[in-house]
Amino acid sequence: MNSFKEENYLKAIYQLGVIDKENVVSATHLANWLFLKPPTVLEKLNSLVNKGLIKYDKTGGAKLTKKGYEIAINIVRRHRIWETYLYKQLNFSWSEVHEIAEQLEHVNSDKLIDKIYSILGNPEFDPHGDPIPNKQGIVPKSDRRPLSKSIKGCVCVVLGVSHDNEVFLNYLSDLNIALNDKLIVEQIISYDESIRLTNQKNEFILISAKAAEQLLVACLKPSCKCKIEI
Amino acid sequence: MNSFKEENYLKAIYQLGVIDKENVVSATHLANWLFLKPPTVLEKLNSLVNKGLIKYDKTGGAKLTKKGYEIAINIVRRHRIWETYLYKQLNFSWSEVHEIAEQLEHVNSDKLIDKIYSILGNPEFDPHGDPIPNKQGIVPKSDRRPLSKSIKGCVCVVLGVSHDNEVFLNYLSDLNIALNDKLIVEQIISYDESIRLTNQKNEFILISAKAAEQLLVACLKPSCKCKIEI
DNA sequence: ATAAGTTATTAGGGTATCCTAATAATAAAA
DNA sequence: TTTTATTATTAGGATACCCTAATAACTTAT
Ligand SMILES: [Mn+2]
Ligand SMILES: [Mn+2]
Ligand SMILES: [Mn+2]
Ligand SMILES: [Mn+2]
């Protein structure tokens, strides 16, 4: 058993598939992501193929089968529900929840997850704005997109980050940007694509192009012209 | 690294030490407890000796060192705090919490345990009446003892069970006995040592000698003569 | 005290995970 | 199109955990 490792492999295959939609999920790719070496990963991939949890070939890379997807999405679901529980019920900060959820996601009790999910009011998004798959494995859609794709004048709300990396989350705290903040795009500086914003307290914030690519927002005005460009 | 197995060995050595105070904690003993075979356990015991977590010799059996005790008691602490949290905050039943706590006890986050412990109001006993060690590893004392050691007329309160075995807990539910119930010992039937009780609703309950040995209670009357006999 | 029954240890394997070094297969550059 | 760099795969090991079978060491009951 010790399905804990296997769960992490399947989750990683799912995650890399979502991030690198065009690229194949190769053993090397996975090895970097999981801090392992390619032969180690390849060995495991072969075993996952044998168990019918993935398909694998050099050209297409690793792809989850229906069975593999169900396991992976369930772990993602548990992870995001725990993150939300830690954030909302236990007062952990935005940047602390991921590490603990990495462990809690492997606790195998549907009743426990159902309970905390219902206490939270069946939320659709976690504290980083990531969608929480429902019990059927269906991932809620949202129109969040990187702040970097905004046009001048756009009024938007902070919904999350591309990767819940602690360093970046703390960097945002330093910039005084938090989840659900309303931001107005005042100016896009063409020299380096950095963005000048105002927040709801009318404070100015300057955010780098790199950070703007990682920060996910949604337009608040239904008629916002940003939407056309995406 | 996978310290999860190691934690379970150390916890088992602690638990067997508490249960069988006179007997040594032998590899065979542990093997039965952990559903493993003696050579498997012996191998692990040797590795624990090498790591300085236990002392081991044939005559004395396995004994935790200070370092080993600290790990073991911390797992016990986490287990009992989680059981209490599941019972009190998440409305799980008496008999459901153990299985889930077996998993949650290995989640390594002091901040998480501190948080739920404080939400619970720093309780001293878990839902089975087992003492919750404090952060320093000190186990609260209580005067709970098996119901079987009661004398006629004793008024006592149900504080727990010797082993949080699901079958026994469900059996108690069937007998209509729950945690914190007040019981009066009406008669001890000498033929088979079974005990006739009344509960707070004045209902009669007949409990077998075997069950009475597993059910832990404490006298409510400070002057109760039971105390002398223990 | 000796035979029989128990317990403790050794020997020898098996699987799951991981690794380094070497080789084969591709892709990129010159 | 060679040469060079990158990837993918194989080969060969190491460690953690588990097991069965065999042996050694102890107990217990004649
Ligand atoms: Mn996360
Ligand atoms: Mn998240
Ligand atoms: Mn328990
Ligand atoms: Mn308990």
Image: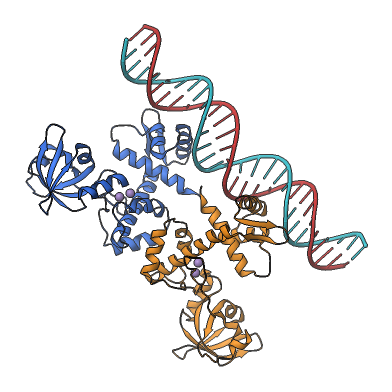
Chain colours: A orange, B blue, C red, D cyan
Q: Residue at x 60, y 68 (%)?
A: A18
Q: x, y (%) of residue A164?
A: 52, 70
Q: Is residue B175 left or right of residue B6?
A: left
Q: Is residue B218 above or below residue B26?
A: below
Q: Is residue B98 left or right of residue B149?
A: right
Q: Nearer the viewer, residue B174 or B153?
A: B174
Regarding residue B165, the answer to whether it shows in the image is no
Q: Residue at x 21, y 39 (%)?
A: B213
Q: Residue at x 33, y 58 (%)?
A: B86
| Quarter of the C terminus of chain B within the rendering | top left
Image quarter of residue A147: bottom right
Q: Is residue A210 above or below residue B2?
A: below
Q: x, y (%) of residue A121?
A: 38, 72
Q: Is residue D21 above or below residue B205?
A: above
Regarding residue A52, the answer to whether it shows in the image is yes
Q: Residue at x 40, y 28 (%)?
A: B58
Number of residue marks: 0
Q: Is residue A95 left or right of residue B84?
A: right
Q: x, y (%) of residue A87?
A: 41, 70
Q: Is residue B93 above or below residue B190?
A: below
Q: x, y (%) of residue A220?
A: 50, 88
Q: Is residue B88 left or right of residue B194?
A: right
Q: Nearer the viewer, residue B26 or B192?
A: B192
Image quarter of residue B163: top left
